[in-house]
Image: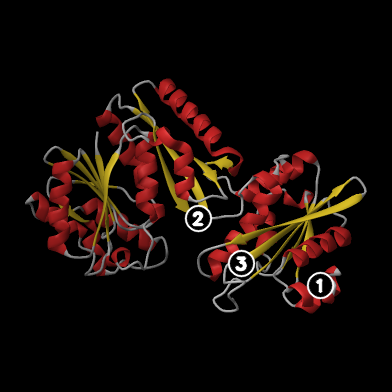
Amino acid sequence: MPAILLSIGDELILGQTVDTNAAWLAGRLSGLGIGCVEHRTVPDDLDHIAEVIQQCAEAAKVLIITGGLGPTDDDLTRPALAKAMGVDLTEDPASVEHIASYFKGRGRVMPERNRIQATHPQTSTMIENTCGTAPGIRATLGHCEVFVTPGVPREMKAMFEHEIEPAIQDRAGTARTILTAKLNSFGSGESDIADRLGPLMARDRNPLVGTTVANGYVSVRVRSEHEDPRQAKALLEEALAQAKDKVGPLAFGQNEVALQDVVIALLTEQGKTIAVAESCTGGLISGMLTDVPGSSASVLGGWVTYANEMKAEQLGVPMALIEQHGAVSQQVVEAMASGALEQSGADFALSTSGIAGPGGGSKDKPVGTVWIGMAYREGEAVKAIARLAILPGDREAVRDRSAKCALQLLRLQLMGEDLNQMKWASAP
């Protein structure tokens, strides 16, 4: 049963607000075995909205509209839906009472303007809003079931769970099961990951396998469909296993798992500790690690040594080394990591030094040049290594990817991978 999601609002068209509703709804519909064939976004224009509603109703069995149910002049979803249906708006007395009670419960009198929120197209019905003023609307347009909710995520989600989801399930009957998952990787570009996946990405197979890039991660997306839920799950798990085998050690987790989650889990499992010495990343690595609940058992602390004098005073990096090789060098990040290891008593230490931009680059060391260091103990000895990363993007992207390179380097070390055999330091 095809579905379309329609988001309404100038703020969405202009990029002033990110439409998180569509992503949430698409995920919930997918879990019901209902595929979204299209996401559309339109501005606050009555005729445009009405035209798009008619187009969507002709193309889908379910249309979910979010936004445009407020009390102001630019909230046009109600009259646009009425125009698309060829009917007039009518006022619902129960909704007027509900809105008035909502304001009364907050010690206020309902503004007359809010009365418009109790109107709906004739032949449609209202959807109760349990956490706001604007009721939703349920209507039928041709063969399409239309549901309208406010754009406020909390109100939209409550309406979906209480009324829209049960109604869709009743109409869908025994729908196909659609399952989705993603396998996250870091350390290689999207085209390289696609080459590794090869025939798995053929568009005529089930499950469908694709790739996407977000926040420096390349994720392998898998979508499995089958009438039998157990078979859908089996197909999904098989495809994920095949993708993991193709991507190799650069793959670190599924769905919303982040690199720092995996690193903390490995440190905890092995009973190891970490300290951090950061220059260009300015505390990002420490922040990522300590964002993970339970990280206090593994993260001892760290230093942000932006100035060369701080590298020398706090970490024991010889000034002669900095003067000879420059702060952004293999020698200096290895010394930073070794100093952090010695000062903290940790089992591992990470360090970064680079040119995040927008200025400060040179022909030999352009913006995006970052050295990642790691020190660890081998028996009584301290061993330090470093890897060079040339990272694309603006200052924020370079710093973020530098931190993730450091975390990936530590993860691979904890997993016992041969770092010399891996091209881990490139990032999408």
Q: Amino acid at mark 3?
A: Thr
Q: Which residue is mark 2?
A: 428
Q: Is residue 398 above or below residue 40?
A: below
Element under label 2? loop
Q: Quadrant of residue 51?
A: bottom left
Whether residues under marks 1 and 2 lie with C-beta atoms below 8 angstroms apart, the answer is no
Q: Is the residue marked by circle 2 packed among few (<14), some (14-19), or many (20+) residues within 10 Å?
A: some
Q: Earlier in the sequence, mark 1 or mark 3?
A: 1
Q: Could you tell me residue 284's position as x and y percent? A: 65, 63
Q: CA distance from mark 2 to mark 3?
A: 15 Å
Query: How far is disc 1 from disc 3 in space, using C-alphas?
Result: 19 Å
Q: Residue at x 33, y 38 (%)?
A: 165
Mark identifier at residue 369: 3
Q: Are marks 1 and 3 in contact (CB under 8 Å)?
A: no
Amino acid type, callout 2 = Pro
Residue 113 against residue 267 in the figure, above or below? below
- The x and y percentages for residue 329 are 71, 67
For the rendered model, the colour scheme is secondary structure
Q: Amino acid at mark 1?
A: Leu
